[in-house]
Amino acid sequence: MFPIVRVLFLTFIFVLGFLLTAWASVGLPRQELTASTQKQAQSRPPSPQPIIKKPQRIDRAGINSADALMDLDIAPPRGLNIFDASEIAFDTPAAFVGKIESLQRYLQKARIAFGQTPLSEDPENDTPFYQWQTFLKQTAYLASKGKIEAVQAFVNRTPYYHDSDSVGSGDVWKDPEDFLTFGGDSEDFALTKYISFRVLGIIPERLRIAVVFDQDKTLYRAVLLIYTNTDVLVLDETKNDISITQDLPHLAPVYSFNEHHIWYHWKKNTRPPTTFLQTDMQKQYPVFP
């Protein structure tokens, strides 16, 4: 009995030793190969980090649909000065409340009409206001660059009439429906563009209507500004090409505004007034000079 047990025990030891030897002979090269591979990997230079490209302008106006214009629904970066001028912001000056309320009212009217206008054109409704709403419906599917170029071209086809020519006297801020029907002057062009972009989803922090002094023509007029991530675009009623403020040194900003605030501007290297009351602004610069 005991010899049999001893034989079985020795056999078990022999088989176990054989298996351990075979495992070692097969496994060690793999371990050595793995260690060698790891050593080679460690000796390789690290992979270069991906290069993050900053937004680059692809045309003179700085319109870059891939970078600069892809996030017009968030606040613009700080530090973008317009026309190389400094600025100070005011919450709706008392003398400007009526204009701001009008802007908000016109915007609400345009939004309601936008929601009620079908995508396809109605041949029985060919009023300029309806055509504008249909245009906005179709433009809403474009990228930011396409929207800006399309709105600039569409609004600029409206006839230009100074208020003294169209209404007889004074300066009138026209509802976009009246402007598109009868024409208007520079602030009416800028206002209708502003409302167009607001209906298309661009936030007010990216938009301003600016009253500027044109030193070449020696007159005051209004333009629309759009803040991209890299530049401030200028949409003028006198041309369909879109410029940037740095390329228009002959325009000196007086003030700019959106539906929430108004900004007073002054050129660099000149001291701003020590006291600048809201009433002073209206005395110095009428709402539309």
Image (cartoon, helix red, strand yellow):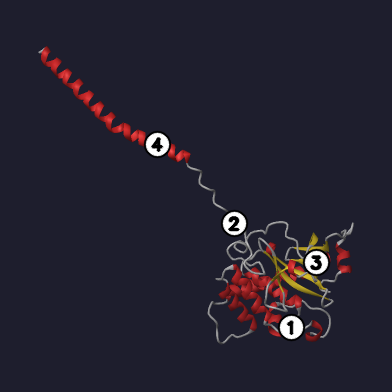
Q: Which of 2 and 45 lies nearest the eye of the viewer?
A: 45
Tags 1 and 2 touching, CB below 8 Å: no
Asked if 127 appears above or below 30 in the picture, the reply is: below
Tags 2 and 4 touching, CB below 8 Å: no
Residue under numbered circle 4 = 36
Q: Which tag, 2 or 4, sits closer to the chain's start? A: 4
Q: Quadrant of the C terminus?
A: bottom right
- Disc 4 is placed on an element classified as helix
How crowded pointer 1 is (Cα within 10 Å; few <14, some 14-19, many 20+) is rated as some
Q: Which of 116 and 212 lies nearest the eye of the viewer?
A: 212
Gap in angstroms between the C-alphas marked 3 and 2: 34 Å
Q: Residue at x 69, y 75 (%)?
A: 192
Q: Which of 242 and 282 lies nearest the eye of the viewer?
A: 242
Residue under numbered circle 2 = 53
Where residue 152 appears, x then y in whole percent?
A: 66, 75
Judged by depth in the image, the label closer to the viewer, 3 or 2, is 2
Where residue 19 appears, x then y in whole percent?
A: 23, 27
Asked if 284 appears above or below 4 in the picture, the reply is: below
Gap in angstroms between the C-alphas marked 3 and 4: 71 Å
Q: Which tag, 3 or 2, sits closer to the chain's start? A: 2
Judged by depth in the image, the label closer to the viewer, 1 or 2, is 2
How crowded pointer 3 is (Cα within 10 Å; few <14, some 14-19, many 20+) is rated as many
Gap in angstroms between the C-alphas marked 2 and 4: 38 Å
Residue under numbered circle 3 = 255
Residue under numbered circle 1 = 160
Gap in angstroms between the C-alphas marked 1 and 4: 79 Å
